[in-house]
Image: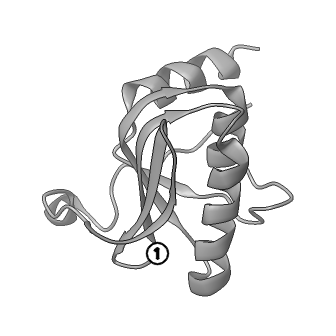
Amino acid sequence: MLVAVMTERNGPAEEAVSPQATLVLYEDAQLSIVQATPPDTVLLKGDIDITNSPALADALAQVTARWGQVMVDTTGLRFIDVSGWRVLVGPGPRVPARPRLLNVAPCVHRLTQRMSTL
């Protein structure tokens, strides 16, 4: 399986501009999901596992429904399991369009590499 990961938006100039948080979509002891400016961008911070991956899917579906697409900045992720990875890399029942990943965290990159060898 091949997974495309977007690391830039519209070129190197935008990499230096970090999104600003505007709306908390979900927060628990492990994970914070924040809609940022620009509004089609979601910032993730913490750990994603089976306990909160449905909340991630709901948050991404909410942003996608409103803006037609979603960019996900994974810089703040420390851990992700397969349930969260599936939400991020592919369309599913809750998120009909594949999110575009920005600033791919090492944990996401490692899991993507491992899953692509299966």
User: Which quarter of the rendered picture does the N terminus lie within?
Assistant: top right
Residue at x 61% of width, y 85% of height: 66
Q: Is residue 94 left or right of residue 66?
A: right
In the picture, residue 104 is in which quadrant? top left
Vertical position of residue 9 compared to residue 77: above or below: below
Residue at x 14% of width, y 64% of height: 13
Q: How is the image coloured?
A: one colour
Residue 43 at x, y = what percent? 39, 56
Vertical position of residue 57 compared to residue 17: above or below: above
Outermost residue, bottom side? 66
Residue at x 47% of width, y 63% of height: 71
- Could one spot residue 19 in this view of the protein? yes
- Comparing 56 with 73, the one in front is 56
Residue 46 at x, y = what percent? 42, 36
Outermost residue, right side? 93
Q: Is residue 53 left or right of residue 104?
A: right
Q: Is residue 85 left or right of residue 110?
A: right
Residue 22 at x, y = what percent? 33, 75
Which residue is tagged 1?
40
Residue at x 68% of width, y 80% of height: 65
As helix, strand or loop, the secondary structure at mark 1 comes to loop
Residue 25 at x, y = what percent? 51, 66
Q: How many marks?
A: 1
Residue type for callout 1: Asp
Classify 10 Å Cα crowding around label 1: few (below 14), some (14-19), many (20 and above). Answer: some
User: Which quarter of the rendered picture does the C terminus lie within?
Assistant: top right
- Could one spot residue 6 in this view of the protein? no
Q: Is residue 18 left or right of residue 44?
A: left
